[in-house]
Amino acid sequence: MSLLEKLGQDPQRSMQRFLSGLGLFVIGVCLIFIGMYHSYIWQIIGLVFLACGSLFAIHGYIGMFANRLYHIVNRTKD
């Protein structure tokens, strides 16, 4: 199984990961803004959410991109 095939084998799950990562990213941004007016601990928690959300979103986007690229490469081979 090629790397593209393995990464892009489930595009719906990749889209779900991307959207959940995007949601975590937005929550992190909101927590950082809350931390500007309240305790700095909210900013630290926001940075953790921001980092986790970014990683999930990147992982999901790579899966979606790999699926599309795999189908483009296989279509041109036929």
Image (cartoon, helix red, strand yellow):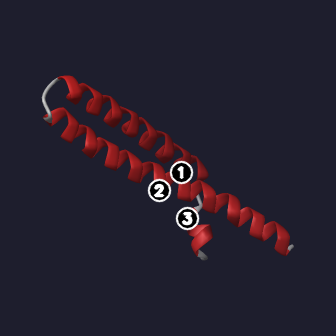
Query: Which is in the foreground here, disc 2 or disc 1?
Result: 2
Q: Answer yes or no: do the residues labelled 2 and 1 have beta carbons within 8 Å?
A: yes
Instruction: Compute the Cα span from label 3 to label 1.
Output: 9 Å
In depth, the one of 11 and 27 nearer the eye is 27
Q: Is residue 49 left or right of residue 74?
A: left
Q: Residue at x 26, y 38 (%)?
A: 46
Q: Amino acid at mark 3?
A: Leu
Q: Amino acid at mark 1?
A: Ser
Say which element carries label 2. helix
* Image quarter of residue 65: bottom right
Q: Which residue is mark 2?
A: 59
Q: Amino acid at mark 2?
A: His
Q: Earlier in the sequence, mark 2 or mark 3?
A: 3
Q: Residue at x 53, y 51 (%)?
A: 14
Q: Position of residue 42 (x, y in %)?
A: 19, 33
Q: Earlier in the sequence, mark 3 or mark 1?
A: 3
Q: Position of residue 68 (x, y in %)?
A: 69, 58
Mark number displayed over residue 14 = 1
In depth, the one of 17 and 50 nearer the eye is 50
Say which element carries label 1. helix
Q: Is residue 38 left or right of residue 3?
A: left
Q: Residue at x 69, y 66 (%)?
A: 70
Mark number displayed over residue 7 = 3
Q: Is residue 54 left or right of residue 40?
A: right
